Image: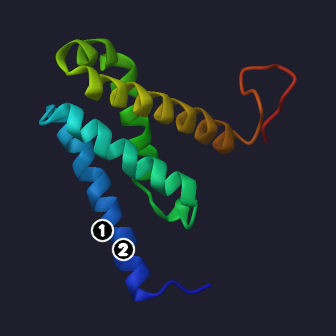
Amino acid sequence: MAMTEETAEYINKKNNLYREIVECLKCREDYSMWLVVGAIEISWLYKSKESLHQFVEFDKLLSTLHMCYKKDIGTLLEEVKEVVATDLLDWADCIDRIFKEWEKDKLGCDNPRSGKYFCL
């Protein structure tokens, strides 16, 4: 199936957005806001799964978000209001589930650490 010019432009814009989100997370500029924005983008794209393989920055953004939530969630929860804390926890759980599913899909097996599975 040939990609239309509009589709290619859309994919390029999304990849640029994903790069920008990662850069903002690295410099910690509006950190909690970008964590949520990144999580929304990742969850929407992962759920739609349309042309997912064409979004080359998806994997990098997902990995970055997963690491950020895992590393900083305790500190973030102390710094934000209760309503925002609940949202951050929900998004952290969402990113963790997507990350685990994505890693499993990439490896093509149910339990990559188990000796009974061989991924060729």
Which residue is found at the position 77% from the left and 33% from the top?
A: 110
Q: Quadrant of residue 105?
A: top right
Between 93 and 4, the residue placed more toward the observer is 93
Report the amino acid beneath label 1. Answer: Lys
Query: Quick one: SS at disc 1?
Result: helix
Percent of width and height locating residue 111 = 75, 27
Between 7 and 56, the residue placed more toward the observer is 7
Which residue is found at the position 36% from the left and 74% from the top?
A: 10
Percent of width and height locating residue 57 = 39, 53
Which residue corresponds to mark 1? Answer: 13
Left or right of 54 on screen, residue 22:
left
Quarter of the N terminus within the rendering: bottom right
Percent of width and height locating residue 95 = 47, 35
Callout 2: few (<14), some (14-19), or many (20+) C-alpha neighbours within 10 Å?
few
Count of residue discs: 2
- Label disc, if present, on residue 10 of the rendered structure: 2
Labelled pair 1, 2 in contact (Cβ < 8 Å): yes
Report the amino acid beneath label 2. Answer: Tyr
Left or right of 100 on screen, residue 71:
left
Query: Quick one: SS at disc 2?
Result: helix
Relative vertical location of residue 22 with respect to residue 19 in this rendering, above or below: above
